[in-house]
Image (cartoon, rainbow, N blue to C red):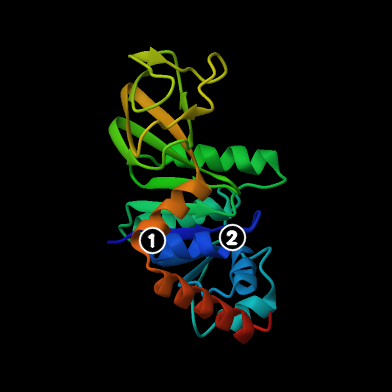
Amino acid sequence: MTGCFILANGRAPIIEEVNYFLNNGYPLLIAADGGADTCKVLGLTPDIIAGDFDSVSPETLQLFSKKSKIQKISGQYDTDVEKCIKVAISMGIKECVLAGATGDRLDHSFNNIGMVLKYFPEIRIKLMSESSILQVITGETKIEGTPGETVSLFGIDDNTLFTTEGLAFPLNRETLPFGKRDGTSNKALTGIFSVVVEGGKGILIRELEKMTAFRLSKESSPASKKSMLNDQKKAFDNNGN
């Protein structure tokens, strides 16, 4: 089973970055309630719309009624984002990108970071914000990136040890407990860097723009990128935008 892309009802992501993930391992698009309205604005058609439907517009549900699988899930003990995560897990999905889950409500943003931790490793979620992408890491993780990109690391407790290679400020079995030691704004020295996490979970945050720009420049030809942008324009036009 391939990965999925969950679009929530927070701050809308950039269409080019959404398409990057949809075309690179996360092709199943799930809209969390009002995230379907964001899909409409972006010219995207979700494969699944799930939630309690207290925020999505009736017009949007009608628009997608014959194109998307509609799953109304009642209950006030989990958010629409968590409902969609559970839908993905029920389908056997192991990898997910979550977007539109940060914004003006700090409590919602903080809760969604908690979702990334709560469901790891049952499903590995990358939380995408306006300019960054967050994920949980354990063991050894090798990352192909861009020299100079900003890399931030956080530990959950005092027992988690970090060792890095290829970063400007190296770590050698050191702790980065959240709220006690600053692990922000390290820099990648080379195109490949590694992080080893021992004794717990670590949080890795990277620059979204540099990450996707590097991948697009490496994996996509100018012709294919032009075609992708033309397809996006047609989708916008067809949806009346």
Q: Quadrant of the N terminus?
A: bottom left
Alpha-carbon neighbours of circle 2 within 10 Å: few (<14), some, or many (≥20)? few
Q: Position of residue 80 (x, y in %)?
A: 57, 55
As drawn, 134 above or below 40: above
Q: Which residue is mark 1?
A: 26
Mark closer to the observer (2, 1): 2
Q: Secondary structure at mark 2?
A: loop
Q: Quadrant of the C terminus?
A: bottom right
Do the numbered discs 2 and 1 sit on residues whose CB atoms are within 8 Å?
Answer: no
In this view of the protein, which residue sits in the foreground, 200 or 215?
215
Q: Secondary structure at mark 1?
A: loop
Give whichever of discs 2 and 1 has the lower sequence position.
2
Q: Position of residue 4 (x, y in %)?
A: 40, 60
Q: Is residue 12 left or right of residue 150?
A: right
In this view of the protein, which residue sits in the foreground, 75 or 117?
117
Number of labelled discs? Answer: 2
Q: Which residue is mark 2?
A: 14
Residue 88 at least partly seen = no
Q: Amino acid at mark 1?
A: Tyr
In this view of the protein, which residue sits in the foreground, 35 or 55?
35
Circle on res. 57: none
Residue 136 at least partly seen = yes
Alpha-carbon neighbours of circle 1 within 10 Å: few (<14), some, or many (≥20)? many
As drawn, 164 above or below 235: above
Q: Position of residue 112 (x, y in %)?
A: 55, 43
Please tell me which residue is depicted at 38% across the width and 13% down the height of the picture: 174
Please tell me which residue is depicted at 62% across the width and 74% down the height of the picture: 40
